[in-house]
Amino acid sequence: MSYKVLFLNPLKDYIDGLERSTPAGFELTVLHVGTSVQHMCQEAAEADFIISGIDIPEEVFRAADQAKFIQYMSSGYGQLSEEVLNDLGIPVAQMKTHSISVAEHAVTLILTLLRRIPASTVALREGKWRQDLQEASYSELYGKTVGIVGLGNIGRWVGKVVHHGFGANVIFYDNAEIPLTVSELISAKQVSLDELMRESDIVCVNLPLNAESQRLICREELAKMKQRGVLVNVGRGEVIDEEALIEVLRDGRIAGAGLDVFQSEPLSLNSELLTLDSVVCTPHMAGVGWENVQRRIETVWENIHAVLRGEIPRGVITQTKRAPSLDNAR
């Protein structure tokens, strides 16, 4: 028996690795970006498993009436709602392998802002030396209060790194149920969002985008931050009111921001964020890295085999509690 695995809109870094690691009994078909929706539907109708890149039209998934499982290659799931994915009736999973990379990137942004690395590099190129710098504008992480907005996998890694590695204090805000008690991770205190914004020296946002998180960090919340405070976002750009953030940065009401995600992506080259000395921007790349590529490829095959064994795959986001029956497997 051979199973057809369809990779739609593939992320290019994963194609070779998936092709090399395809187990016996599986056939991998790759449809690149630009493939017509009609052709994707035709291929999907014959697929046993689907690996999804980004922005796959709903009708393609609807056409996959023989599919037993859909694996997104990212931590998000594109433009489709959970309601639509639930309606497919099969497990749909997102990747949960990127937490370490994203957390390290968040801490890198924090240190880059506190140590003012970009501004110092510019000063050096202008012939300035230590005595020319404004020493009082530099900060260390030790002893600071880091407020984590969203204590999921990423938030926990950030908390562990800044607390155990740099001696920072950690507080957090999260409305979701925390499956692992914070005392098992770090000495952290759960607070209201209002208290977090007021008390934090560094605010680190790690939230996914949903109805509750959209524009959670609005003008009112930003106004509560300390003037020497910095904000880092490695979650989703829409969680923060970008216009309001630009205003407080422009007016110097906070010390800086480190952003890997934006309200509209790719970030426009005309964005004022790229003109502000107090802002460090990166192109939504916190989760990239060759280690993470390997983890994601391994997760694809592990999850597919789990489904074939009748088990629940890792990272499942739909309400399907068990793998579908394989009675009709080809």
Image: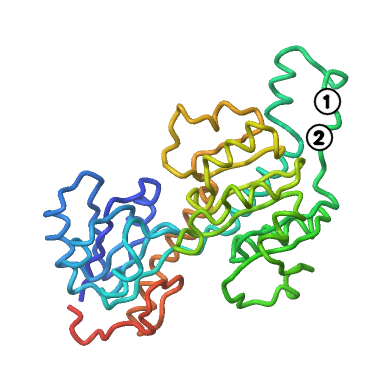
Q: Amino acid at mark 2?
A: Tyr
Hey, which quadrant is residue 109 in on the image?
A: top right
Q: Classify residue 198 by image quadrant.
A: bottom right
Vertical placement of residue 289 versus 132, above or below: below
Q: Quadrant of residue 309?
A: bottom left
Q: For mark 2, give the secondary structure.
A: loop
Q: Which residue is mark 2?
A: 138
Image coords of residue 213 (percent x, y) = 51, 60
285 horizontally vs 325: left or right: right
Secondary structure under badge 1?
loop
Q: How far across and how far down the image is residue 235, in percent?
A: 54, 54
Task: Work out which quarter of the rendered image holds the C terminus and state it.
Answer: bottom left
Q: Position of residue 64 (x, y in %)?
A: 19, 68
Please indicate whether residue 33 sits to the left or right of residue 211 in the image.
Answer: left
Q: Residue furthest top?
A: 127
Asked if residue 93 is positioned above or below residue 30 in the image, the reply reads below
Q: Is residue 22 left or right of residue 156?
A: left
Which residue is painted at 35% across and 81% down in the image?
320
Q: Three-letter amino acid code at disc 1?
A: Gln
From the viewer's side, name the closer residue of 66 and 252.
252
